[in-house]
Amino acid sequence: MAKSAKSIAKTIDADFEEKTTLDTVYLIDGSNRDVTLEIIIGAPGQTAVTDIILQDDNIIKGKKGSIKEFPLGTNKALNGKKIFITTVVTDTAKDTNNTEEIIRLRGGLMFIEYKLFKIVKEEGDSAIFTSVIEFFKI
Amino acid sequence: MKTICFLIAAMILSFPAFSQEDDTTKIKLDLLRAPSSPAANLLDFAVSDIEKPSDVSAFMASLQSATNSNSLLPSHYAVDLAPFWLFRGKGLTTDKMDSRKFSDVFRQTFVFSSAVRGSDSSSKEYNPANFYSSFGIKFSIKRGSFSKQTSETLDTITLLAGQVASDVNATLKATLDSSSEYQTLAEARRNKLIANGGNMDDPEVVAISKKMTGLQESFKTKIIGEKELLRSRLALLKQKAQSFKIERFGFFIDFAGGLTLEFVDKLFSRSNMHNGGAWLTFGGNYESGFSILGLARYLYNPDKIFADNAGAIKTSNISTLDAGARIIYNSPMSRFALSGEGIYRSVLNKNTIDPSWRLVVNAEYDLGNNQRLTFSFGRHFSGTITKGGNVIAALNFLKGFGNRR
């Protein structure tokens, strides 16, 4: 018997491993090219706020929703620095409890996308995604 | 006694006021509203028969079921696809849902609908030898903005979430910066990357990153668990988020349209247009209690002609244009409500029925205790086959039984 659309969707959701924390290195070179950051929030209808600290500067404070691609600094200037990203995604969507954050970095040695994901237990719960990314030149 | 006297007086007043009873209850403005699915509506599908998949996997499952595992063409299938939502509308958070930019409104509200109907011996309207396929679109050109309450709740949620994000981020940074275990692991990862030429997939690098992630996770859990202020903010955030609902007020314009193709003898080369329609809905509702609604509908070969109650003309090769408007004022602080409604109906390419219009003004006063006094006055459709005069006037007193409210 064919699976119902709902059961297929549930199976797909279960295939995603919940992950709310990221700790990694983004490889860069010594060029004057800008490294950019983009943050995309899901699922549709959720409410999110992001706080970003680059080394010691609180560069983004209380930013609502997704964040369009913006420059963090040149490869050269970012070497050895760390970026701390905390996003609180609150479940305000009535049709899903899925919360998701996609972090995209461009301009270094390669384009990289990191995905964080959590299904909150109850309507109105919040998922707190934290990421620490170190910019490092070999 | 006072109530009885008032009741009798109101009844006496109401009898002479009926110059002509409004027998056009079947002619409602709401009939001109755009259907939820234009394509399915044109092929007479019931709303419950329309598939509305919310993601790609649900759409594939629905298509698989309709085509008997992709082995035959569906013969009775209607589907509404909202591309933006189907592909999970990445990045669409609540702050974007209040956007009034046309590009945002269009992509968030666009719906493509499609329906097919094959051999159906039970229906007289559809030839079982032919195949029918319809397509339609629906979207908003303009939509209302969030109500005051929706905006205020959202602002509170955003403020609390911002405070939590800022607090966690700053505390976590300070904790990680001062953790010798974390700093040692970070140093080991850097050294390993230098040694392997920047190979992030190196199992040792992966293992160190995993340990650092675990450490960060435990610090985060500890910060949230130990900070009373953080926990109380999260509790309040949950309470506000649970009560959050989207209400819109303001001006809106919606468009819907579609057409049906008939494939004679199920041959692709022998197709003609079976029927079609376009709907425009516009208006606005405001928190002050004032609302306006305008509807315009064009139909080609409709099932039933709105301007022809008696069924005097056949519906083949017929184009009709109907329009209507309603204005309502119902102040939340007042017992008085005033509304006006106008309907225009016409057949464009036949002279048998002249265009006609109807206009009614209604006033209502809530006397309390389940008692209402209503007054209607207006002009009825004129020159139609079934009606002679054109004055509507009625004064009604309504008294309800039960608890006093």
Image (spheres, rainbow, N blue to C red):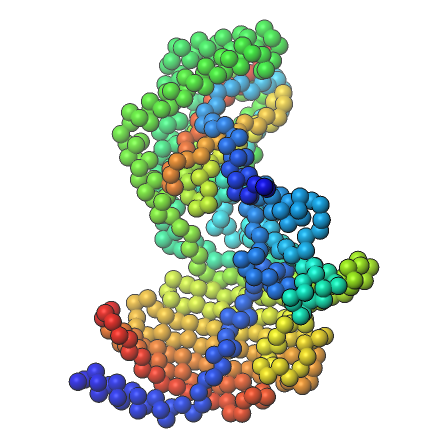
Q: Residue at x 61, y 75 (%)?
A: B304
From the top left corner, tell me how far across and down residue A16 is, in percent.
52, 30
Of B138 and B305, nearer the camera is B305
Q: Count numbered badges in the picture.
A: 0
Q: Residue at x 21, y 83 (%)?
A: B3
Of B67 and B84, nearer the camera is B67
- Residue B111 found in image quarter: bottom right
The residue furthest left is B1
Q: Would residue B158 be visible to someone looking at this image?
A: no
Of B361 and B269, nearer the camera is B269
Image quarter hosting the C terminus of chain B: bottom left
From the top left corner, tell me how far across and down residue B279 is, in percent.
60, 66
Q: Residue at x 50, y 16 (%)?
A: B209
Left or right of residue B166, residue B201 in this image: right
Q: Give the vertical position of B293 relative to B384 (above or below).
A: above
Q: Would residue B8 be visible to someone looking at this image?
A: yes
Left or right of residue B72, residue A58 in this image: left
Q: Give the vertical position of A135 relative to B165 (above or below).
A: above
From the top left corner, tell me how far across and down residue B388 is, in percent.
54, 92
- Residue B290 found in image quarter: bottom left
Of B239 and B336, nearer the camera is B239
Image quarter hosting the N terminus of chain B: bottom left
Q: Give the vertical position of A47 relative to A51 (above or below).
A: below
From the top left corner, tell me how far across and down residue B142 is, in percent.
54, 58
Q: Residue at x 26, y 85 (%)?
A: B7
